[in-house]
Image (spheres, helix red, strand yellow):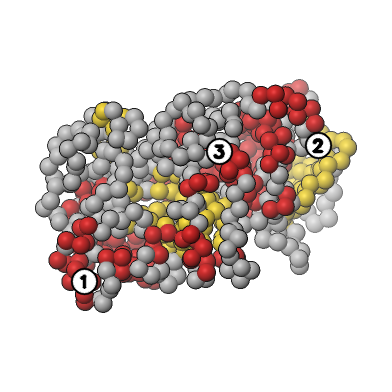
Amino acid sequence: MKQLFVPFFILLSVSTLSQPSINIFPKPVVLVPADGHFQLDGHTVILATNTVRHDAGMLNHYLEKLYGITLPVRKMLPGQLVKNAIFLGIKRRSESKRNEYSLVVEQDHIRIEGVSDTAVFYGVQTLLQLLPPEKVSLTNGVIEIPKVAIQDYPRFSYRGMHLDVCRHLFSTAEVKKYIDLLAYHKFNTFHWHLTDDQGWRIEIKKYPLLTAVGGFRNGTVVGHFPGTRNDGIRYGGFYTQTEIREIVQYAKERYITIIPEIELPGHSSAAIAAYPKLSCFPAESTSIKDTTLWAGSRTGKHVQQTWGVFQDVYCPSPYTFKFLENVLDEVMQLFPSKYIHIGGDECPKDAWKRSPFCQQLIKENHLKDEHGLQSYFISRIEKFVNSKGRRIIGWDEILEGGLAPNATVMSWRGEIGGIAAAKQHHQVIMTPGHFVYFDHAQIKKEDSVTIGGYVPLDSVYNYEPIPGELNATEAPFVLGAQGNVWTEYIGSDAKLEYMIFPRMSALSEVLWSPKDRRDWNNFTLRLPDLMKRYGLWGVNYCAVQE
């Protein structure tokens, strides 16, 4: 794995001389620099209205975390003018954009005003990037913050990052760090992939075997699929409901919504290993090819030890639907998000084709085929989720057999699914693999193992989430886009950070900044400063770009 290597070679050594002094990621809508500085010193105070006291606390949290600085917080009174102060407050305008804020740095004060507390928080993140990109201390006197006037708001309402914790598990501390990195970049959604064939990671009190059995596998293939060997090491774990509540609250404090994903009807090996009756054929052992590198017994139902798509999927039986409703009840008690992600991708139909029960169900419900049965499955789950006041998101396979009435589509197999859904006036989130799959290699001669594919930094930065095929009526159904991180080959926090940076920074600008403000050459000029900031944040990154 290449890391901490001087990037861009001669290009940057020359261009750095003309690099602008103020580098904000993602780039603001309007940024007007001025001569001079505000000097933050030991007497600087934060003045905040009651509505943004939390944002004042978060500003102090990050000042302490990044620079070891804590400033006194006082209540701001109407019309109050105090020198050497950072003002935080709400200011609504009739023409305001959603989550719009302004940040003005003057000689004797800093003022951040937003249309909401969320907007003020985004202003706080921008202010943090006006501070030096390396550790500094007030013991030396002052920290100079350049004078500037910024007016800013996001382009898209959905700005997401995904993390798969099923193939490899990340600790609560690592998940919180991931959330902080999202907050620095003004992302507002964390898509948490919690169940899959290789592990069930969320405690469900009604079904304890989901974690006791489904949360662990007896080994893991080593090397690129199909692997060179199986390590034979029991691997797994899960998040307790207490830990999940803690993480949800942590994200909420940073204005990030967590969308949980509970995979169905495919990618369900871990659940079936725990409760075989969920399968169309409970008495059959998990199908394991003779060539599969496997640890332990091949008899009975098992959590998968390798990667891919597997034939044993949920049976659309009353038992299964009751199970899923009970699971989703507990999930929705933990996650207050408007959306619940139900997967819906890569569901083989072989078991349904040979199941007499499934074939009878197809006839009784006048379904065309097994694709119609998938639509029936998704629609039934959607009705249940809707009855709880929530909505479902699914991968673009949920279009098969007809789209559930209120479903939002995540388009990952290119943009075709998203285009089709938007033309049907369904909400869409763009996640096409060849632009925003951060488990793919970002350099051609990558010396660490990746799943394959090639998504260089410029492909991410130049991605446009609204396809040209959509007209003015259809385009607004594209809510935004999301970067996806599948972890078959990402087993540590350092590798995770290496795979997402700097690509996640590029995506943040795609989703936040106006389309006409994006400029690849300008982005490359600003990258050295950003990489210094990665060091300040204590994160790993890929420093060589192509």
Q: Residue at x 22, y 57 (%)?
A: 350
C-alpha span from label 1 to label 2: 68 Å
Residue 145 falls in which quadrant of the image? top right
Labels in figure, total: 3
- Marks 1 and 2, the one that precedes in the sequence: 2
> Where, quadrant-wise, is the C terminus in this rendering?
top right
Task: Please tell me whether mark 1 sits on a helix, a strand or a loop.
Answer: helix
Can see residue 246?
A: no
Neighbour class for label 2 at 10 Å: few (<14), some, many (≥20)? many
Rendered location of residue 430, percent (x, y):
52, 55
Question: 61 above or below 67?
Answer: below
Percent x, y for residue 544?
A: 58, 28
Q: Which residue is mark 1?
A: 361
Residue on which disc 2 sits = 146
Instruction: Give SS at disc 2.
Output: strand
Which residue position is annotated with label 3?
456
